[in-house]
Amino acid sequence: MNDPKKFATNIATSDKTSITVRGKDLVGELIGQRTFTEMLFFALAHRMPQAGETRVLDACLVTLMEHGWTPSSIVTRLMADSTPGQAQVAIAAGLLAVGDVFAGTMDGCARLLAAGVEAADTASWCRETVAYHRTNRMPMPGFGHPFHKPDDPRPPRLFAVAAEAGYSGRYIALLRELGTEFDRAAGRHLTINATGAIAALLLEIGIPVVAMRAVAVVSRAGGLAGHVVEESQAPAAREIWRLADDGVPYVDPAN
């Protein structure tokens, strides 16, 4: 016989008259009582956040929501044009671009920081970590940006929000120390980017590493919804297609 325990969940259940989410009544305790950010924290950390934790998570969600023309927004626009009236298709397609290159690198940075704070000597750990990435020509997750130079303007504000909320701790300090060591070793400046800062902030408030890319997905989904709406009002997808088609010459494989 099938074991029902194998399909058990602690997340939610419902009956004819109620819905329960992690032991709380949806209608009586959550709707109108808790914000979306609080509920996201509740889903990821399995507890309701303190006010400062809510503020930090909310700042992270706002930061990654929008960045103009990116692969994810372009894909969303193209799909919105291809499947009009199907917002879920366009947004889902755009979210597939959230990964190791765009918007989703905070989990890699978080794994580094989680290991680094356990080191007996963080200075030595930073030197070894930077040397490893430079020797192997590997990008350090959480550092560098193709457009924002010399510095990404978002991390300083995120760090300030964390400090104001009472969550400026060892992960943020280690991220800054790692950046300083890279600059020293390379003889040039490499900015801490938004995903690096967000990784540190999410660790400070207890969000597990496995959930961090999901935070990016949730945030970016809101931004892509805006692109779906704008595409319906001020279409751009066909022009993007035309530019790509006009700008790439055909090469005869026989020649």
Image: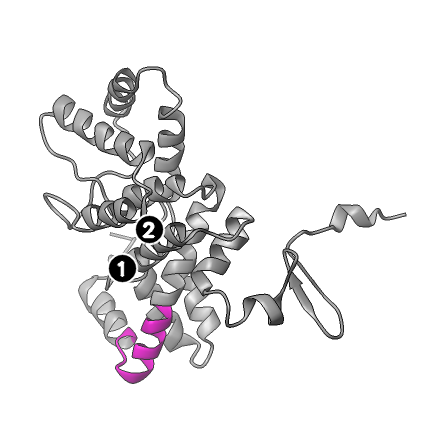
In the image, which residues are magenta?
A: 224-237
Q: Where is residue 34 in the image (x, y as percent from the top left)?
A: 49, 65
**Pointer 1 residue:** 70
Asked which quadrant contains residue 141, the reply is: top left
Amino acid identity at mark 2: Ala
Helix, strand or loop at label 1? It is loop
In the figure, is residue 22 to the left or right of 214?
right
In this view of the protein, can residue 96 be seen by the observer?
A: no
Q: Which of 189 and 60 is in front in this view?
A: 60
Helix, strand or loop at label 2? It is loop
Separation of marks 1 and 2 at Cα, in angstroms: 10 Å
Please tell me whether residue 234 belongs to the stretch shown in magenta.
yes
Number of other residues with Cα within 10 Å of mark 1, as a class: few under 14, some 14 to 19, many 20 or more: some
Work out whether mark 1 precedes mark 2 in sequence or the reverse, and give the earlier one: 1
Q: Are marks 1 and 2 in contact (CB under 8 Å)?
A: yes
For this orientation, the residue located farthest to the right is 1
